Amino acid sequence: MVKVVEEVNSLSLAEQKELLEEIAPELLAKKKGEKKSKLPPLPDAERGKVVTRFPPEPNGYLHIGHAKAAIIDYEYARMYDGKFILRFDDTNPENEDIVFYEEQRKDLRWLGIEWDKEYNTSDNLKKHYELALQLINQGDAYVCTCKPREIKERRLRGEECSCRKRSKEENRELWKEMHNEIPPGGAILRLKGDMRSQNTAMRDPTLFRIVEAEHPIQGDKYRVWPTYDFAGAVEDSLSGVTHPFRTKEYELRDEVYFYLLEKLKLRKPHLMEFSRLSIEGMPVSKRLIKPLIEEGKVKGYDDVRLPTLRGLKRRGILKEAIRQFVLSQGISKSEGVVTFDQIEAINRKLLDPIAKRFFFVPNPIKLIVKDAPSVEKELRLHPTEDLGYKKIKTGKIFYISKSDASNLREGETIRLKDLFNVTVEKIGKEVEGRFAGMEVKAEYEKIQWVTEDHFPMIIIKPDLLFKGGKYNEESLKEIGGFVERNIEIVKEGEVVQMERFGFVKIERLGDRPLGIYVHR
RNA sequence: GCUCCCGUGGUGUAGUCCGGUUAAUCAUUCCGGCCUUUCGAGCCGGCGACCCGGGUUCAAAUCCCGGCGGGAGCACCA
């Protein structure tokens, strides 16, 4: 066994591949197709007939949690050659903001998601009113004029209130008044469920309430708005969604969902839940993030420490990495906290073949090589991929990182990577060395360097926003150093690899380039 | 408090519905080796898990009961 391993290891990579091709070509083939992780099959699904939907509320920027839902919905639609609907669940005019309809579309487009149909729930209020009236006429819904506190208490105790006994005529009358004179909070439409149900969601949930705020799209056309329970179920059914997904915290509401559709005699979709995605130290909640933005501790919703799509994008996380990550999580209901390095690992694999290589020297120390020959040559921008070349020209002055310098010993020979060897002569505030030949030798330590022709550069290194449940004051560090002038050849926004330092997204070029540390 | 969901190696997942072809999947982390003028990747190898206790059964990660642990809901928010 050990012998076989040794034998295989003694072969070059190409030889190994060749041999594998001979013995078991299917193993290689599998390797290639493996990239796209697959979701488990959908129950009751037929090719061409699956319809899914992503229903965000236009009240903020999309984050990784939304991405999970959107990607799963979208992927399933694709998997079954079905349809994917983008539906803005804009049924609370107090929360919605016109800008987020478009901002969320942008976030989705960035993710590479395309939708077959788009509409707003608020476009269908007329229909919702019709259905509400149907429920009233069937005696399945009633207008409740109790105080919110009383409703809550009765719900807790499982007691019915007298509003429940109202006649259909009375309910119709009050329903009409809800659209006109009744002030907000004065009345709601409730489903006649079961006040003694074990499931508190079934204790006559609210279907419609009065909200007077101006709606970003409907203006002041409506003042009676459906709640999530009503709008969600009705829209899924009416829009032809076959497999709606939602996160686990809605699970108790399933009963309401189906009971409502039953009473309305509407088609029942195959509803499913999955766990919420949470990443350690990167909360998604606006409750936590907003104050930090207001205090100036977080720069905005595209701050690199945030799990918003914009934050991740700015941080140098590729959309494909997000997709693969989400799919790797699947639709399990078990909740857990994922660490960010899972995303980083995927991102690194995607980035590695396309990131150009450069030298960045953090905390530079001067290295003088008095007898250094002047060298001018071209170097590959990537060790194995064909990404082009960069030109270098060197003199007698170099800069190396403090950490490399501190490892040097006098008399030792090291190699300035891609250049030549240097024997260390004197170590002080500066390092002095002597040219020691061009030949590459395996035993020489290879270190990165820049010449006098460099830019000072700052690299911002994000860390966990929250540590131990508290804001991490150390969550944004700056690393100063020198970068080779060749960095000019990349585009702003491009991710490069600073050798032996890490992947860095070039945020800004110029005389003082700015970078964001992506990951090692 | 009540109700619901979940509990597989350090981490995340597959398998659980329809008990047995599973030596329990895959990824990540970690460790060792090969390759390499960086790191990583790649290649080879390794460590490592079915929450606990009962029961049913020839056979249980899988079914049943009871604990324990985690999460969620109990809004006129989604």
Image (cartoon, grey):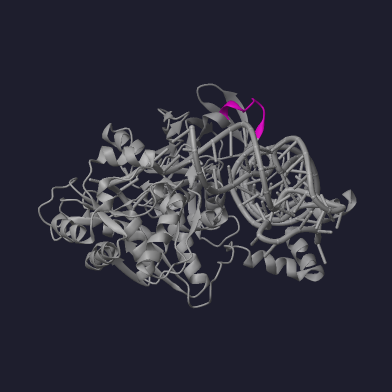
Using the image as rendered, state which of residue A332 and residue A263 is in the foreground. A263
Q: Is residue A101 above or below residue A240?
A: above
Residue, x 38% and y 55% (percent of image)?
A491
Q: Is residue A520 above or below residue A167?
A: above
**Residues in magenta, as a range:** A405-413
Task: Check residue A409 for magenta coloring.
Answer: yes
Left or right, A492 with reference to A43: left
Q: Is residue A138 above or below residue A64?
A: below
Q: Is residue A444 visible?
A: no
Q: Residue furthest toward the bottom?
A: A48
Left or right, B50 with reference to A198: right
Q: Is residue A516 visible?
A: yes
Using the image as rendered, state which of residue B77 and residue A496 is in the foreground. B77
**Quarter in which the C terminus of chain A is drawn:** top right
Residue, x 34% and y 64% (percent of image)?
A234
Q: Is residue A40 above or below residue A337?
A: below
Rendering quarter of residue A373 = top right
Task: Check residue A205 for magenta coloring.
Answer: no
Left or right, A363 with reference to A212: right
Q: Residue furthest toward the left?
A: A181
Residue A508: x %, y % from top left: 34, 47
Using the image as rendered, state which of residue A371 and residue A35 is in the foreground. A35
Residue A63: x %, y % from top left: 39, 50
Disc count in the image? Answer: 0
| Magenta portion: prevailing SS class | loop
Residue A85: x %, y % from top left: 38, 68
Residue A139: x %, y % from top left: 30, 61
Residue, x 27% and y 52% (percent of image)?
A165
